[in-house]
Image (spheres, grey):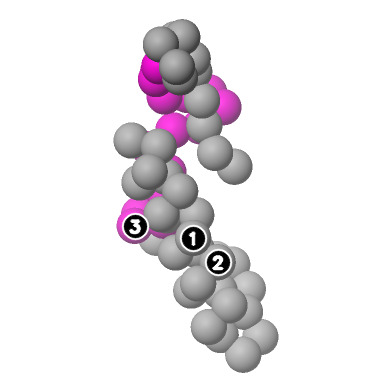
Amino acid sequence: CLAQDASRIFDVYWEVGAQKNGSLPPFWPGRFSALSSSKYPLAVKFNGVPARVYLS
């Protein structure tokens, strides 16, 4: 869901920011992978209106 994607994005910033010279890992851990993307957005309703969304 959208909240899980937001949490995963936060986790990436938290993990990278905790390192002295933080950088993205050479291999992306599965726990950081989002559930949605521009190719596969989530279908949600916003104020009763159908929408397709993803966070980046």
- Measured in 3D between alpha carbons, the distance from the residue under mark 2 to the one under mark 3, in whole angstroms, is 13 Å
The answer to whether residue 43 is magenta is yes
Whether label 1 touches label 2, CB < 8 Å: yes
Start and end of the magenta stretch? 30-45
What kind of residue is marked 2? Answer: Tyr
Q: Which structural element holds mark 1? A: helix
Q: Is residue 34 above or below residue 29?
A: above
Q: Residue at left 56%, top 27%? A: 38
| Direction from residue 14 to residue 4 in the image, left or right | left
| Direction from residue 40 to residue 56 in the image, left or right | right
Q: Mark 3 points at which residue?
A: 31
Q: Mark 1 points at which residue?
A: 10
Percent of width and height locating residue 17? 58, 77
| Direction from residue 20 to residue 18 in the image, left or right | left
- Measured in 3D between alpha carbons, the distance from the residue under mark 3 to the one under mark 1, in whole angstroms, is 12 Å
Q: In this view, does 54 lie above or below 50?
A: below
Q: Residue at left 35%, top 54%? A: 30
Q: Is residue 20 above or below residue 1?
A: below
The answer to whether residue 5 is magenta is no
Q: Which structural element holds mark 3? A: helix
Q: Mark 2 points at which residue?
A: 13
